[in-house]
Image (cartoon, rainbow, N blue to C red):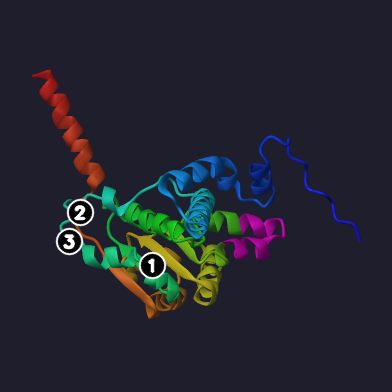
Amino acid sequence: MSVDAAPAGDGQDPLGDMAQRLNLTRTAKTWRELLDAAARENLSHRQLLERAFSDELAARHDRLVARLIREARFPSIKTLGGFDWSHPTAIPQPLIQRAAELDFVQQRGHLIFLGRGGLGKTHLATAIGVAACQGEIRTLFTTAADMINRLVASKADHSLDRALRRYGSPRLLIIDELGYLPLDKEGRDLFFQVISKRSETGSVILTTNKAFRDWGEVFQDNAVATAIAERLIENGELIKIEGSSYRVKRKKLKGSDAAGLGE
């Protein structure tokens, strides 16, 4: 049985060529610097290899994280460090910071962020999602409306099973903005299917402006609303945020600044 030969190098950089052929892309670029450092710091062979392997693993991690963040389709990149904790009048900051350690993902748990619009629910959900990607956890971000629209469209072209796998396979699924629009029978049935699958495959972070008692209005069916809520809360944590909309506050501040300029 013949084996295809790897492309030959140019003969001017044999170590770099071999590293490239072994897919050691970081080492292929930095082997000269590594050898210089070994000579300068009097590294042993073992220390040199440890440094080379460590650099290679770090580079691979960075590439993987970049790919996971890209595939997660976040609307923007957010961090907990960039969140204004002083704006909400009530927010369980220690609970959210613990959630960012991602133990709930290991346990296939769920987080439900509840609060009115403009309190930073999407920011916090995204920040935890970004942290998950940095922990090499496959994540997907979607709004509730976009997810349902995609699933409904997939029924029309007979690709529903593939669409359900899209939302069922990531270890962490973030569903943003549940409650802003009511769901019809088709929409609530599809939403129920996604949540049911998630209990077997991984975690959900859900943001909503509706308390559980009002989910009957969202799903237009109390039995389905109760079944979905029970599946989420059974192994989930409710994170309630209170206060006024940050967007309204920012708009008022801009208005005050403009009035000041006119004085």
Q: What residue type is disc 3 on? A: Ala
Q: Nearer the viewer, mark 2 or mark 1?
A: 1
Please state, as top left, top right, bottom left or bottom right, where the N terminus lies in the image: bottom right
Q: Which residue is mark 2?
A: 85
Residue drawn at x 53%, y 63% is 187
Q: Which residues are magenta?
A: 152-166
Q: What residue type is disc 1 on? A: Leu
42 horizontally vs 186: left or right: left
Q: Which residue is mark 3?
A: 90
Residue drawn at x 51%, y 50% is 59
Q: Percent position (x, y) of residue 210?
A: 33, 63
Query: N-terminal of the two: label 1 or label 3?
Result: 3
Please state, as top left, top right, bottom left or bottom right, where the C terminus lies in the image: top left
Q: Do callouts 2 and 1 mark residues in contact (Cβ within 8 Å)?
A: no
Q: Percent position (x, y) of residue 2?
A: 90, 57
| Residue 157 within the magenta-colored segment of the rendering | yes
Badge 2 crowding class, 10 Å Cα cut-off, few under 14, some 14 to 19, many 20 or more, is: some
Q: Secondary structure at mark 1?
A: loop
Q: What residue type is disc 2 on? A: Trp
Question: Closest to the observer: 231 or 76?
Answer: 76
Would you say the magenta stretch is mainly helix, strand or loop? helix
Residue drawn at x 54%, y 40% is 32
Badge 1 crowding class, 10 Å Cα cut-off, few under 14, some 14 to 19, many 20 or more, is: some
Query: N-terminal of the two: label 2 or label 1?
Result: 2
Question: Closest to the observer: 33 or 3?
Answer: 33
Q: How many marks?
A: 3
Visible residue check, residue 151? yes
Visible residue check, residue 92? no
| Residue 36 within the magenta-colored segment of the rendering | no
Which image quarter: residue 150? Answer: bottom right
Q: Which residue is mark 1?
A: 102
